[in-house]
Amino acid sequence: MRRGPATSLPALLLALALPLAACSDAGDDPDAAASPTSGPSEGTASGSPGDDAVAPPTPTTTSFEDLVASLPQCAEVWVADQALPADYAGCKLPGGGIDPGVVLQCVDGAGLAAYRDRFWARLGDPVEDSGGGGTGQDPEYATEVGACQGE
């Protein structure tokens, strides 16, 4: 079974990495931009000196505490017959921990999530309750995992 990481962590890493990726070696050398041999920057049509100036991206920071605070309570998300949010990325556990929202990435592009070996759903679909036997004893869950993996 191939599991993908929670979407919140990759989104955070991407948000933090984008401002760094936008930098180049030429941006560190003030003479490089003024060099007469340098042509117009990519994406400029006229090549006039004012066209080379591009405002750097504004970095945004999100603390871990802010990310955790933005997560819904698990008891509010994992309710039988209620739609699991299509952007599910984890939830807050009773007592203060977090469920990281591990989602199985399906071959059709959808995601399949499970919680506490009892509840499961495709993202955006109603939550199923496997009952006391858990997901390991739920034939519907087994069928859904197989379909998710392309079997």
Image (spheres, rainbow, N blue to C red):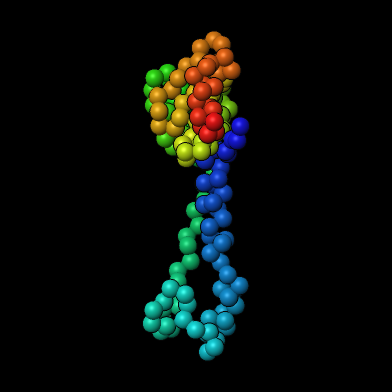
Q: Is residue 89 visible?
A: no
Above-or-below relation of 10 to 142? below
Above-or-below relation of 106 to 13? above
Left or right: residue 67 compared with residue 46: right
What is the quadrant of residue 52 in the picture?
Answer: bottom left
Front residue of this view, candidates 12 and 131: 131
Place of residue 23 in the rendered image (x, y in percent of width and height, measured from the top left): 56, 67
What's the residue at 57%, 14% (across, down)? 137
Place of residue 139 in the rendered image (x, y in percent of width and height, measured from the top left): 52, 17
What's the residue at 52%, 46% (across, down)? 11
Front residue of this view, candidates 33 and 58: 33
Which quadrant holds the C terminus?
top right
Which quadrant holds the N terminus?
top right
Above-or-below relation of 143 to 47? above
Q: Is residue 140 visible?
A: yes
Q: How many discs appear?
A: 0
Q: Residue farthest to the bottom?
A: 36
What's the residue at 53%, 57% (across, down)? 18
Place of residue 44 in the rendered image (x, y in percent of width and height, measured from the top left): 41, 76
What's the residue at 42%, 35% (across, down)? 86
